[in-house]
Amino acid sequence: MSKLSIIVPSYNEEEAIPYFYPEVNKVLATMPGVEPEYWFINDGSKDNTLEELRKLQKQDPEHVHYVSFSRNFGKEAALYAGLQSATGDYVVVMDADLQDPPKFLPEMYQLLQTGEYDCIGTRRVDRTGEGKVKSFLSDMFYKVVNKISNTSIVPGARDYRMMTRQMVNAVLDMPEYSRFSKGIFSWVGFRTKYLDYHNVERVAGESDWNTWSLFKYAMDGISDFSQAPLNIAVWIGTFAAVLSILGFLFVIIRHFVEPGSSVFGWASLVSIILLIGGLQLLCIGILGKYIGRIYLQVKNRPIYVVQEKK
């Protein structure tokens, strides 16, 4: 028997969990020789998600377990907590809303059994049902991060993936505070195959990921796996400095060529000062982003705090 740990980060998923558990069990029934182990991670939900998990655990105490955080620490912390709790030979990460089709579980397991791969991931080939702005920003993120980072991230890749114990242990060896799992999964390497599928609507409830949340998540991913923003700041500073020197030389030469000439007005001068000041603030902000991540890391605070676990 192989043990399969199923990690389910859950935030305000009280409506989806009653659909998720029987649907996955139905698929697992077609996988002989596999013993499931569920790890639901309640990420400080504000609804009755914890109550639903307690009921589920009482129904199937042998296979269902949960970890409940003291507050909302974010999906990345929930995913990390699940990986730490999982004891299976194979580990799969899934969302409770069934946007990660359980039907792929048998195929994932069979492909890993061949020994040819260490991870079977999934990739959405379209974003049907999502807003155009959200889809555009997502596509742009993958294009930008793959150009400026040494770590390649497959466009449309989901957290939904099945991994061997060896790969899970490699991910757990990276206890960094600011986490971007898509990048971490790619950075640790290992042989990975992706299964393509079309976008699936949520089975119940509403997504807590709005455009602004995804934008901040994308910025975290870029700063975690690329130093390009710092290089951009250096080039902006260099360009501004060269421009200032040229302007200074122009003023001096003009003074000798046209004695008594004056500057063409304060408006242009103010505009230049505002431009240079804005560039300086931009560069300081980029630098502060990286320093802030160092600050959070060196404080060595726990990534999450557990309030209840069964």
Image (spheres, rainbow, N blue to C red):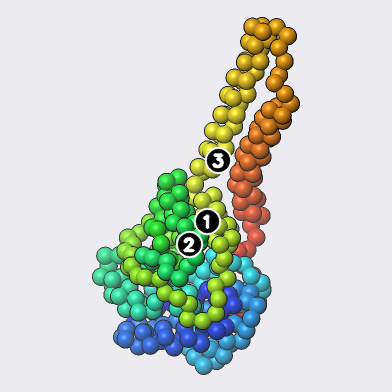
Whichever of labels 2 and 1 marks the residue nearer the N terminus, that label is 2
Q: Check disc 2 and report the residue beneath it.
A: 132
Q: Which of 30 and 46 is in front in this view?
A: 46
Residue 205 in view (yes/no): yes
Q: Where is residue 55 in the image (x, y as percent from the top left)?
A: 57, 90
Q: What's the amino acid at mark 2?
A: Lys
Q: Residue 218 carries which label?
A: 1
- Residue 301 lies left or right of residue 195; in this view the side is right
Image coordinates of residue 234 in percent, x first then y, are: 56, 34
Per the image, label 3 sits on a secondary structure element best described as: helix
N-terminal-most mark, 3 or 2:
2
Kindly indicate the quadrant of the structure image that contains residue 260.
top right
Residue depth check, mark 3 versus mark 1: number of the one nearer the observer: 1
| Screen quadrant of the N terminus | bottom left
Determine whether 167 is above or below 297 in the image. below
Q: Residue at x 25, y 70 (%)?
A: 114
Residues under numbered marks 3 and 1 in contact, where contact means CB atoms less than 8 Å apart? no
Kindly identify which residue carries mark 3.
230
Q: Residues within 10 Å of mark 1 (few under 14, many from 20)?
A: some
The crowding category of the residue bearing disc 3, from other C-alpha atoms within 10 Å (few below 14, some 14 to 19, many at least 20), is some
Q: Is residue 183 visible?
A: no
> Label 2's element?
helix
What residue do we see at 59% from left, 67% from top? Answer: 74
Residue at 56% from the left image edge and 67% from the top image edge: 209
